Image (cartoon, rainbow, N blue to C red):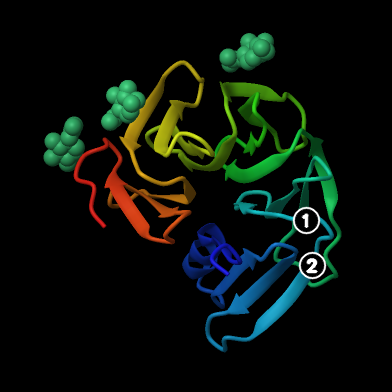
Amino acid sequence: MLFAIYLLFFILKYFATAGKQEKLLYTTANNIQEIDLDTLVVKELAYQSTESRSLAYDVQERYVYSLRLTENTIVRFPYPNDQAVNFETVVSTNRPYYVAFDSGNSHLYWTELNTLGRVVRCKSDGSDVTTIVNETLPIALALDIYNRWIYYSTETSNALLRVTFDGTERQVVINLSSRLIDIQVDFVDQRVYWMEYDTGDLKSVLNNGSMSKQ
Ligand SMILES: *[C@@H]1O[C@H](CO)[C@@H](O)[C@H](O)[C@H]1NC(C)=O
Ligand SMILES: *[C@@H]1O[C@H](CO)[C@@H](O)[C@H](O)[C@H]1NC(C)=O
Ligand SMILES: *[C@@H]1O[C@H](CO)[C@@H](O)[C@H](O)[C@H]1NC(C)=O
């Protein structure tokens, strides 16, 4: 199934730089799993009874954030962690769809998948909920913490969009022929990657919108 796997690159990077075992965390619709990249052993970390589309990691406080679309909550658990996963509710919100974390500022960002939807942020304790931008059916999002852009997509626009962290400037980076999901920012190459929903194609563009290439 095309959308079975949502990769979480931050954790991979974190373990790589810490010189420990490399592990990759991801979520299928209902299971958060961990792969040990040396042994390829897969470990089941947690089962979630409602669908979760994305994970985010806070490298500072070391929490994994996940969401519960139909329970209208965002949850988190400490990771790495030897004990059984215990979810803690961070914030109640209306149909959360994708999460991202800005560890430098300890801010959680997410999209709310509603016709009158929005891109929202709050502090890691769930306080100070702030609307960044009102948007129709926003889906994926990713943070460019260096250039201070939030990249996101919507169900209906077939475009890669971005908005400044303070919400004052919103731009179409590139118009496409498909919805896009799973946006990732490559800080080194200054490119933004995404997967196209209808074809599964992985594509990218320079972060100024030029030189689209497959
Ligand atoms: C979003 O919409 C709400 C309700 O219409 C409005 O009060 C708020 O000012 C809007 N926020 C932004 C950032 O546009
Ligand atoms: C994308 O499409 C919209 C609507 O057709 C148009 O206004 C806008 O200029 C386009 N933007 C880019 C970057 O191609
Ligand atoms: C985008 O950045 C590239 C590489 O820095 C540059 O060559 C290109 O002219 C820029 N395009 C725009 C539209 O700014």
Marks 1 and 2 close (CB-CB < 8 Å): yes
Picture coordinates of residue 107 (x, y %)? Answer: 63, 35
Residue drawn 75% across and 63% down? Answer: 30
Picture coordinates of residue 49 (x, y %)? Answer: 84, 60
Mark 1 vs mark 2, foreground winner is 2
Q: Determine which quarter of the picture holds residue 51.
A: bottom right
Picture coordinates of residue 40 (x, y %)? Answer: 57, 86
Is 199 located above or below residue 76 in the figure?
A: below
Ligand 1: give its quadrant: top right
Task: Please tell me which of labels 1 and 2 falls first in the chain.
Answer: 2
Q: Amino acid at mark 2?
A: Ala
SS for callout 2: strand
How packed mark 1 is, by other alpha carbons closer than 10 Å (few <14, some 14-19, many 20 or more), is some
Residue drawn 40% across and 38% down? Answer: 160
Q: Amino acid at mark 1?
A: Phe
Q: Foreground: 72 or 87?
A: 72
Is 192 located above or below residue 117 in the figure?
A: below
Q: Residue at label 1? A: 77
Q: Does residue 14 appear in the picture of this structure?
A: yes
Q: Does residue 108 appear in the picture of this structure?
A: no
Q: Residue at label 2? A: 46
Residue drawn 69% across and 55% down? Answer: 64
Q: CA distance from mark 1 to mark 2?
A: 10 Å
